[in-house]
Image: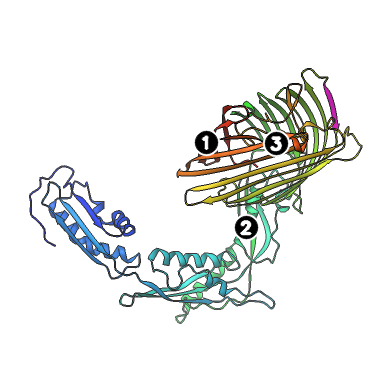
Amino acid sequence: MLFASAVYAQSPQGVDYTVRIDAPRALEELLEDNLDLMRWRGNARVDIEQLQRLVKEAPEQARTLIATEGYYSPKVSAGLDTSGERPVARVIVDPGQPVLVGDVDLVLQGFAPFEEGGAPFDAAALRNRWTLPVGSQFRQGDWEGAKRGLLRDIAQTRFPRARLVETSATVDPDSRRALLRVVIDSGPEMRFGELRIRGLKRYPREVITNLNKINPGDEYSEAALQALQSRVQDTGYFSSVEVSTDMRAVLNAEIADIKDDADDPDANPATPEPPTGPTTLPVVVRVTENKQKNVEAGVGFSTDTGARAQLGYDDLNVFGKRFKSDLIYEQKRQTAKGEFFWPTTAKGYNDSISAGVEREDLRGEITTLASVAARRSWGSPLLERSLTVEVLTEKREVEGLEPTRTKSLPLTYSITRRKLDSLIQPTNGYVWNAQFGGAVLPIMTDEKFLRLYLRGLYYKPVGTAGSLILRAETGAVASKEKLGVPSTFLFRAGGDQSVRGYGYQELGVQENGATVGGRYLATASAEYQYWFKPPWGVAVFYDVGNAADKFGDLNSKSGYGVGARWRSPVGPINVDLAYGHAVRKARLHFSLGFTF
């Protein structure tokens, strides 16, 4: 390419020049990020001679970079136009046809079962998970990623000491084919041994041992270690938890092998000796204990219940149990509660007892509820179940009516199923909850009743930047008389997590000017979110629902509007402006986190 001649004054910032790259978009970005011609712009040391050298070197640099994307026969030219006020360096790229993977030779060494009845390693499944198959475009990054992924897949179960002993990629530019060869050695098979705990001082060993589902002799599994670490961390007893295996026996054996190889001139490290049997690895849990006693205070605001102040006390060892207490003051609700938690049992049960008092002043109805409860929960965040028995006494006041007092002994079974891509920031999947219970025994119960409640959420991606959220809930209470059923088991609707456009629990049964709970509930919601600049997004929604004493009186009230969304580190933050069609007014709603 011809170079026009001109004289440029040298400034303190060097020669001011422009670079224009003519290449397919993906390659253009690669060259912009890596060419010396781009990196040296604005450098005071670049004069016109050095600029010409950079232009001359650009084609070879571009060929090297383009080869990493699978193009091994590109046509690259570069030149410098100095006819204008600013020099313009041009790089022109015709990448040609990419190199494709022609064959994959995947060799597995040492993966035979080591004992009679032992399960062989599924080599076919491993080959099926290879991420750079025949016919795919050969890119250097994909090649490195495929090797790392293969090693990672093997190391996660049974063979954590697996290693690559040979890898090669032979590229034929003329036929545009890459022949791949990977030889991987399993190393010794690993099995779990005894459990060892480090760092435990104040709290009983059962806090950890009851959560351990790893048995001596089980096959090594990284997922099992991570699950144990998560369960121990979730107890709240520890500020840090690390679960690993003690590899010292393996490392000592490898060091001995290296010394033997050094003494044997015929030894070849690429062809290791076949393993003689499984190696036992103790499971080590290292913990740092949290402070035994902790006091927390906070303030906040909710468009449902108003300003909020909270004081909490947490003691991790009261008679060997964890004790938590909270004092919460909100404009519409005040709560005082204390709860004892037993360590998780060996069968996975979490037991607790609690006592508390709650006062609510909502829509002309004032309720004061005192309760003592015993609860057993079990399962996992994906499938969570609980059984709760309560002793309740409630005082209910509505202006113009005589106050009433109710006592009840209800039993409630709850099950929650989650299948979500994230428990904090869900975008795909579903979650549902079902509750069934009631007070059916004539013991400490003024009115026998049965109650059913169902709630579900569904998330569905729409295109590359949108998502659809569907929500529905329904409930019913069966009893001879409504009077005597505690208000906490009846239903109302409206608010941030219900029908937007209406106040918190504004929809329900009218009684002497107050809105009170009803026997039946039905609500539904559809929302579309568009993430124009993640983590920022906007939403449009339509909510509908109501509560009533008779199923036929469930006259739906609708609300609709627009909202702003932000995926914060602690969960989604939603700000909505909703119009309540029945009340003919707009209302602002604010909510934080994924609530279910």
Q: Is residue 467 left or right of residue 62?
A: right
Residue placed at 70% from the left, 24% from the top?
363
Which residue matches tag 3? Answer: 315
Residue neighbourhood size for the residue with mark 2, other residues' Cα within 10 Å, grouped as few (<14), some (14–19), many (≥20): many
Which residue matches tag 2? Answer: 225
Question: Is residue 236 at all visible to an observer of this figure?
Answer: no
Amino acid under label 2? Leu
Any mark on residue 562, and which? 1
SS at badge 3: strand
| Disc 1 to disc 3, C-alpha distance | 44 Å
Q: Is residue 183 left or right of residue 421?
A: left
Residue 472 in magenta stretch: no
Residue placed at 88% from the left, 34% from the top?
445
Q: Is residue 106 above or below residue 568?
A: below
Name of the residue lying farthest toward the top: 400
Q: Are the residues tagged 3 and 2 within 8 Å (C-beta)? A: no
Looking at the rendering, the stretch of residues picked out in magenta corresponds to 403-407
> What secondary structure characterizes most of the magenta part?
strand
* Mark 2 or 1: the one toward you: 1
Name of the residue lying farthest toward the bottom: 266
Residue placed at 23% from the left, 54% from the top?
20
SS at badge 1: strand
Residue placed at 34% from the left, 65% from the top?
68
Residue 405 in magenta stretch: yes
Residue 358: quadrant of the picture: top right
Q: Earlier in the sequence, mark 2 or mark 1?
A: 2
| Disc 2 to disc 1, C-alpha distance | 44 Å
